[in-house]
Image (cartoon, grey):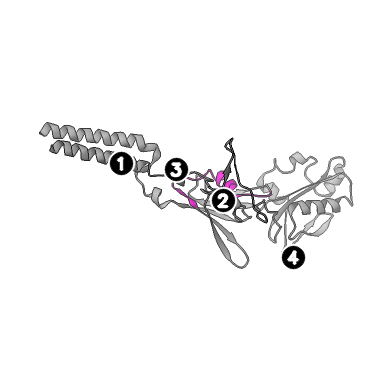
Amino acid sequence: MRVNRICKLLFAIVLGSICLTSCTSQRNLIYLQGKDMKETKNGVQTYTYREGESNSSPDYKIQAGDMVYVNIFSTIDEEASRLFGSNSSSPTNSLQYQSDQNIFLSSYEVDKAGNITLPVIGMLHVGDMTIEEIQNLIKEKAEEYSKDIIVVCKLVTFKIRVAGEVNRPGVYTFYQPSVDIFDALMTAGDLTYDASRKKVRVIRKTDKEDIIYTLDIRKASVLRDKNYYLRPGDIVYVEPNKHTKNLTAVNRPLSTVSYALSIVSAVCSVVAIIMALK
């Protein structure tokens, strides 16, 4: 009877350990969950914005200290290209095949008054304008000197720092007009297993204060969060999950089977020893 009780106790321990392995809920690992998302018959989830509610990508307004890449050239007039200091006569060579250093050297810093100074064209006020507006303004001014002008204009200071529980922390430069939280996290190699999906911090510096926002990327509602889209200079910090960080191998999903088997083996050994002693 005593042996039976011991066996039952040991097997209860095994069962409890196996249950613990499932306690690392997938609910804390899956992105974009949400009861407010409507699911159609074909499995597509949608959320319809209410009247006055929106979360479209914002148009970033150029600020003092930003670096703006500008390349002005003509496809039919090489002399005009040289006039504006262009190092290219083709739009395909204007940006993507240049090194970061060359892009920086071909860029213009926006001064405190919101101005940049270009060859031939001179000073232009670009503060609080979007990149598209600046590009159109430069094209308009350049066409006073030559026709068939092409202008390539990009913001080169759209840098995001990603730190914490990601696979590749670092500083990343984006050349697209808008960057969201998932752009930053995926570029940094996604979150580690130990990352807290419910506490992704966005640190934003302003002239008057530093602001820290917290995003819960487990919830689909993050897509509607006003801080879903990042700004140049933002820092994304992913906190560790206090529970998973301190867990042993028993709680790791990938080691569940092997750990359970080792427990079963240990129990069998103990039972064998007890039976032999008896």
Residue at (40% x, 48% y) in the render: 244
Image depth: mark 1 or mark 2 in front: 2
From the viewer's perspective, is residue 73 above or below residue 42? below
Q: What SS does tag 2 mark? A: helix
> Badges 4 and 3: C-beta atoms under 8 Å apart?
no
Of all residues, the one furthest to the left in this rendering is 278
Dots 3, 2 in contact, CB < 8 A: no
Could you tell me the amino acid type at mark 1? Ser
Q: Which residue is mark 4?
A: 113
Q: Is residue 208 left or right of residue 251?
A: right
Describe the element under mark 3 as helix, strand or loop: helix
Q: Residue at x 44, y 47 (%)?
A: 194
Q: Which residue is mark 2?
A: 221
Q: Residue furthest bottom?
A: 208
Disc 1 on helix, strand or loop? helix
Of the image marks 2 and 4, the number of the one nearer the N terminus? 4
Residue 235 position in % (x across, y down): 56, 55
In the rendered structure, which disc, 3 or 2, sits on the residue that comes first in sequence? 3
| Rendered-image quadrant of the C terminus | top left
* Residue carrying label 1: 17
Q: Is residue 207 part of the magenta span, yes or no? A: no
Residue at the image position 26 percent from the left and 41 percent from the top: 13
Marks 3 and 1 sit apart, C-alpha to C-alpha, by 18 Å
Q: Give the magenta part as a residue range.
A: 177-198
Q: Which residue type carries mark 3?
A: Gln
**Label 3, label 2: how far apart the Cα atoms are:** 18 Å
Cα distance, mark 2 to mark 4? 39 Å
